[in-house]
Each structure stands twice: as structure tokens, then as C-alpha cells.
Image (tube, rainbow, N blue to C red):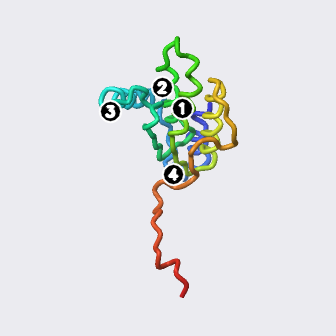
């Protein structure tokens, strides 16, 4: 239900806001395919055998929504661990989670993303120690973040 809530809610509650902020759901199948392709590139073209769990791999999701792409990445890490190395799962998931950055514009999806990611990690043995353990910012990805230094000077 988390996956569809905000898109369907906004479609009924405020279709103009939904269009304005781009609150559209990406099907899980598409996310899995894209994550799989990137994982393959990381391993076979960029020499990162641990893919998303590699210390040097950082991911940025500029429109996190309810966390479908970060969850897809964590699921990919989980699925790539061989059965004989199951004890390494929490450390690999924590490393991957620490290297995922995201931006979300709406407070509802932002909160749901934190909830879903926390729950996924906890279910796989990763201790989640704070209320907002992920590097997901509540901000507008498309807004200008440039500062005019002259505007800050006193007259």
C-alpha cells in the first residue's frame, strides 16, 4: 500500500499539486530492471565487484518519493550476497544505505521513505539508531541553490 498511497491520494485530493510536484509512481518492475542494469555496469564496466555495497559507490536519488529506488538498491545488495556469506548482510546493507543520498519535496513521501527504509534494514538485522538515519533531504531538487553574495551584504 505504501507504493501507491501518495500518487493515488494526490490524484484524488489535489491533481494540480500532483502534476506540479511530479508525484508519479515508478513501477517496481521498472525500478528492478534499472537497478539491475546499473549493478551490472558497476561490476562489469567500473570494476566494483560489490556493486552498490562498494565503499566507493554513492547513489543520488533526486526524487525519492516513498523510497522505491533506495529500496531497490538495498534489495539488490541483499540478493547479491551468497548463502554462505549471510552473516555479512547487515554490514553490506548498512554500507549501501550510508551511500544513498536523496531529495524529496513532500513531507508525506519523505516520511514514508524513512519508514520503509528503516523497516527493511531492521528486518535484515541492521540496527537503525536514529529517527532519520538516511541521507534524504526534504528539499526542492529543481530550486536554485545559488546564493548571491551581494544580497547578503548590509547596506
Q: CA distance from mark 3 to mark 2?
A: 17 Å
Tell us which disc is closer to us: 3 or 2: 3
Mark sitting earlier along the chain (2/1) = 1
Q: CA distance from mark 2 to mark 1?
A: 8 Å
Q: CA distance from mark 1 to mark 3?
A: 22 Å
The residue closer to the viewer here, 84 or 2, is 84
Q: Residues within 10 Å of mark 2 (few under 14, many from 20)?
A: some
Tell us which disc is closer to us: 2 or 4: 2
Q: Which residue sits at x=36%, y=31%?
A: 42
Mark sitting earlier along the chain (1/3) = 3
* Residue on which disc 1 sits: 71
Q: Residues within 10 Å of mark 3 (few under 14, many from 20)?
A: few
Query: Label 3's element?
Result: loop
Q: CA distance from mark 3 to mark 4?
A: 34 Å
Mark sitting earlier along the chain (3/2) = 3
Q: Give residue 93's position: percent from left, percent from top.
A: 55, 29
Picture layout, residue 98 above or below residue 45: below
* Residue on which disc 3 sits: 46
* Residue on which disc 2 sits: 76
Picture layout, residue 39 above or below residue 22: above
In the rendered structure, find residue 21 and report the number of the disc placed on it.
Answer: 4
Tag 1 near tag 3, CB within 8 Å = no
Tell us which disc is closer to us: 4 or 1: 1
Q: Give residue 91's position: percent from left, percent from top.
A: 57, 28
The residue closer to the viewer here, 55 or 7, is 55
Mark sitting earlier along the chain (2/4) = 4
Amino acid at each position: 500500500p505504501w507504493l501507491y498511497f501518495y500518487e493515488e491520494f494526490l490524484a484524488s485530493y489535489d491533481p494540480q499539486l500532483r502534476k506540479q510536484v511530479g508525484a508519479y509512481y515508478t513501477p517496481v518492475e521498472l525500478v528492478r530492471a534499472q537497478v539491475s542494469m546499473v549493478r551490472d555496469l558497476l561490476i562489469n564496466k567500473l570494476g566494483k565487484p560489490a556493486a552498490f555495497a562498494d565503499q566507493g559507490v554513492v547513489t543520488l536519488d533526486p526524487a525519492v518519493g516513498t523510497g522505491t529506488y533506495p529500496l531497490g538498491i538495498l534489495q539488490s545488495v541483499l540478493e547479491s550476497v551468497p548463502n554462505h556469506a549471510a552473516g555479512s548482510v547487515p554490514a553490506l546493507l548498512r554500507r549501501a544505505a550510508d551511500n544513498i543520498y536523496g531529495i524529496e519535496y513532500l513531507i508525506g513521501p519523505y516520511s514514508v521513505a524513512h519508514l520503509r527504509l528503516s523497516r527493511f534494514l531492521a528486518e535484515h538485522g541492521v540496527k537503525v539508531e536514529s529517527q532519520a538515519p538516511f541521507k534524504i533531504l526534504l528539499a526542492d531538487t529543481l530550486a536554485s541553490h545559488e546564493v548571491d553574495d551581494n544580497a547578503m551584504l548590509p547596506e
